[in-house]
Image (cartoon, rainbow, N blue to C red):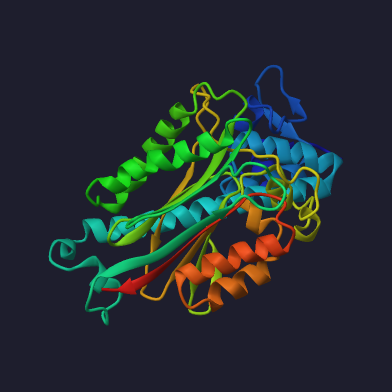
Amino acid sequence: MGLLTIGAFARASRLSAKALRRYDDLGLLRPARVDPYTGYRYYEEAQLERARLVAWLRRIGMPLTRVRSVCDLYECDAGAAARDIRAYWAAVETETAARRDLAAFLIDHVSPAAATTAPVARRDTTMTTTLGLRCAALSDRGLVREVNQDAVYAGDRLLAVADGYGTHGARAGAAAVEALKRIEAGPPSRAGDVLNALEDAVERANDALDGLDGSGTTLTALLWTGERMALVHLGDTRAYLLRDGEVHRLTRDHTVVQSMIDDGSLSPEEAAGHPRRPLLLKALDGDRTAVPRPDVRLQDVRAGDRYLLCTDGLSAVVPDAAVRRVAAGAAEAGEAVSALVGLALGAGGPDNVGCVVADVVRG
């Protein structure tokens, strides 16, 4: 079978001739033959499948370095290539959700009406009073561990949980929460400024861990701006939102097992008992040369919302359905944290457990 000219190959693959020349230079899609005198490129028809895969992957926004990896993987293991695409798209959706929330804030922020219209009133025209938080926090050593390395905090504006590890894990968790409390002590800031402040606080928390060799902490926190909740998250501590009878998980675990779930190599059911479940991909450990970048996002708030933050001493030992049922059924925040810690202890209490619950109320 004869070779296809670059023009014919471009039409068949839905790639431009310019793109094909670039992919040749990058080693992503080499032509079958290059004329030694004219430099004209020719392609085999069998190369169309790879070329079309490149075009499709680029259409979903995948970077060229990862496109090459997926294409090479596809030629030897199509299932593995599919899992890699699935993992990439899961990460895109997570990032898009956070950027969507920030975009909504920016639209409100730059709107000409922003200077004269209260942001809360725009989101809920029936709201005639300001919103506030009623919250409670509780931590327990559990039934197995000798030391409690969980740190929890529920203040007027800040909700936080941290799960320390290593010899100085208790100090690490407490230091992370203290770094965030400095933001709470200041005046409320615009939501966009708060996200930057939270990232700065994470860097300060990481600096505070310098010298605690082999120790570190996870961290999940929500900061009330007066208009929205600002979320910061690292590790496998979690944040949930209970709204209108439904439960929404606001965080994604930064763990090896979660990455395996994302790429399809592990089911959520298999993850529960996986031996690598505790392995973290992101945490604060005092290393100033590689401070992990936290997940940050803005969360709209409504009267009647209930927020739950917890360490894996709860989420890893109590089924999600039970956590959701108890968190939603308790009348008050204090009742909820007591019941949730009781669930973890009733399941054997193999780890420290920490919970924070906050209700959004009018007035």
Query: Looking at the rendering, which quadrant does residue 131 occupy?
Result: bottom left
Residue sticking out furthest to the bottom: 126
Query: Looking at the rendering, which quadrant does residue 164 occupy?
Result: top right
Q: Name the one closer to the observer, 33 or 74.
A: 74
Percent coordinates x, y for residue 230 in the rendering: 38, 54
- When the figure is inspected, residue 205 is found, relative to residue 236, above or below; the finding is above
Q: Left or right: 142 with respect to 283? A: right
Q: Image point 59% across, 23% down: which residue?
A: 213
Q: State whether residue 24 appears in this view.
A: yes
- When the figure is inspected, residue 19 is found, relative to residue 155, above or below; the finding is above
Q: Name the one closer to the observer, 325 or 148.
A: 148
Q: Image point 51% across, 34% down: which residue?
A: 171
Residue sticking out furthest to the top: 37
Percent coordinates x, y for residue 343 in the rendering: 66, 66
Q: Image point 32% across, 58% down: which residue?
A: 156
Quadrant including the C terminus: bottom left
Q: Name the one closer to the observer, 232 or 125.
A: 232
- When the figure is inspected, residue 6 is found, relative to residue 160, above or below; the finding is above
Q: How many marks?
A: 0
- When the figure is inspected, residue 226 is found, relative to residue 145, above or below; the finding is below
Q: State whether residue 11 appears in this view.
A: no
Quadrant including the N terminus: top right
Percent coordinates x, y for residue 265 in the rendering: 79, 50
Q: Left or right: 249 with respect to 47? A: left
Percent coordinates x, y for residue 221 in the rendering: 45, 51
Q: Name the one closer to the observer, 282 or 318.
A: 318
